[in-house]
Amino acid sequence: MASWTDLTDKIQESEKASADIPTPNPPLQSEFRKEHLYSLKTAYFAGVMSEKHECLLDVGQLEANASTSRWMPAAGIRMGTRRAVHTVAIIIRRCAAPFWLKSANPPEKPRRTAYLDGLRGFAAFLVYWHHHELWVHKATGQNELLENSFGYNGNFHLVAFPGVRILFNGGHYAVATFFVISGYVLSAKPLSLIHEGELTKLGDNVASALFRRWLRLWIPLMAVTLVYVSSWHLLGMWVEDASPKSTWLAEVWSWYTEMKNFNFVFSGGEPWLSYDMHLWSIPVEMKGSIVVYTTLVALSRVSRNARLWCELTLIFYFSYIADGWYCAMFVSGMLLSDLDLLAAKQQLPRWISRLSSARAFVFYHLLAFSLYLGGVPESGSRDVAQLGKQRGWYYLSLLKPQAFFDYKWFYLLWAATFLVASSQHIKWLKGFFEARFCQYLGRISYALYLVHGPVLWTLGDRIYTAVGWHSEQQLQNLSHWADKFALSKTGPLGLEISFILPHIILLPATIWLADIVTRLIDEPSVRFAQWLYSRMLPHAVKD
């Protein structure tokens, strides 16, 4: 916990900062400053200024500290009209300011798992880029060139070259990486408690995390999708493949009936949300989280070697016996977290410790394998015979287990596992993910994942139509946009001038909106879930 001296310093800094906040009148500013300083003091005595950030969940530092932070209902609810207006003004000011000026300065010494935040952020960017590539090139029928290997049917394009292709078609590679990272960070704190024999604290930790998990995932998702579908009626815009209802109320009811089934992860029904098909991975994320928490509790009392063997057995089971590809990814992340914690204490099994002298050799090869396997051709990914016809994949296609229905996830399981395993041990790669921009992307990664689709289907579709990327549907429904600013399609596949230049607008707009969603919806939802859980605890437990 922070010392009283640290708190005094924070109060002095806050006094200086709050003095610069413009307000309609001095009394209101004085009242605002008093309330803010009172909150700091209350936070100190409540013990919310803990600096334990080691156990990251899947949203970076904020959720890592959720177990020690408390959310209270917004003060504006209890304020008078003047103070409520001032609060709204602050929110507007925060949203309007450029996002690059609002990002926090990086700490002098990154947290142990900071590189995973950056990796998650960069993976979210790959998802963004992949979906834009597919959206644009479907109009010209070139998606097949992106989804097949280099040299397939005599087509040789840079975007299909091994290693390079993940930058253009790496969306599923990124999703697999999300799942392995989640398995790693969700289990980091519980595993450290298991290693220390703190089983009572383990129960408290898992109970809190499992209670908050559903709220943390679905509150932002429901908020973003509801605003998106409401925009159809508010702005009267046409969106490809959307089927708006006759009225807004009818739309909300349709959204509700679909959402209530979508957020029940055990329904076994349609895995897609028609309002945003990209969000299929969120129920998978919830199910994978339950697998991690269940496994942690089940293995909490066994010996070190037994736990490691059980984790390996589960990966084998989910890969070669049952088609549980996402479960294998989560457990793989858990295994990597377990091994890293043991390595920090020099308690690794002897046969693994003997490989330490060849560390660079091992991890550079894992990275190379990851980049190659991450570019698995996805065209017809349920037909392994099709994979065997791809250049450089015939012998690899023979390794696909019978249990896998969609073969790409088998190769992506190992690609993502090798990437997460090697990132920590390759200095330049870890440094890249710990760089400020990647850390910022990691902070907004969930919001970026939520908003990039709606931005693409509304603003993006119109800009692409204006520069010359359009199909018959766009010509019929967006005829007033068609070729308004026609640009040349000169350039390599996937890097055409008319594809790159629109991102001067689209990328900043998407990141700015993701920043707003992070600040106004995502981060408050994390604090709300923690506050709700703390309010439900008996007083004896709270104390």
Image (cartoon, rainbow, N blue to C red):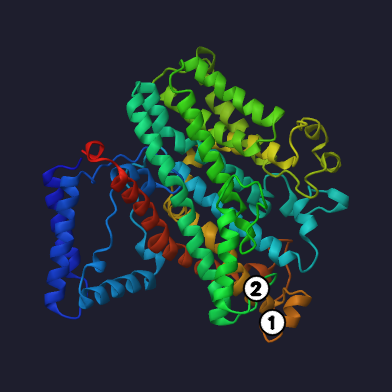
**How dense is the environment of label 2, judged by Cα within 10 Å: few (below 14), some, or many (20 and up)?**
many
Tag of residue 452:
none
Q: What type is the residue that disc 2 sits on?
A: Asp
Secondary structure of the residue carrying tag 1 is loop
Q: Quadrant of the C terminus?
A: top left
Q: CA distance from mark 1 to mark 2?
A: 9 Å
Q: Can you give x and y, in whole percent of width and height, for residue 155 in the image?
A: 84, 54
The answer to whether residue 425 of the structure is visible from this angle is no
Foreground residue, 309 or 134? 309
Q: Quadrant of the N terminus?
A: top left
295 relative to 125, above or below: above
Q: What type is the residue that disc 1 sits on?
A: Leu
The answer to whether residue 72 of the structure is visible from this angle is yes
Q: Can you give x and y, in whole percent of width and height, for residue 385 in the image?
A: 86, 40
Q: Residue at x 62, y 47 (%)?
A: 267
Q: Residue at x 79, y 68 (%)?
A: 140
Q: Can you give x and y, in whole percent of width and height, for residue 397 in the image?
A: 80, 35
Foreground residue, 111 or 530? 530
Tag of residue 461:
2
- The residue labelled by disc 1 is 478
* Quadrant in the rendering for residue 538: top left
Q: Is residue 530 left or right of residue 370?
A: left
Q: Residue at x 58, y 65 (%)?
A: 255
Q: Residue at x 25, y 42 (%)?
A: 50
Q: Are marks 1 and 2 in contact (CB under 8 Å)?
A: yes
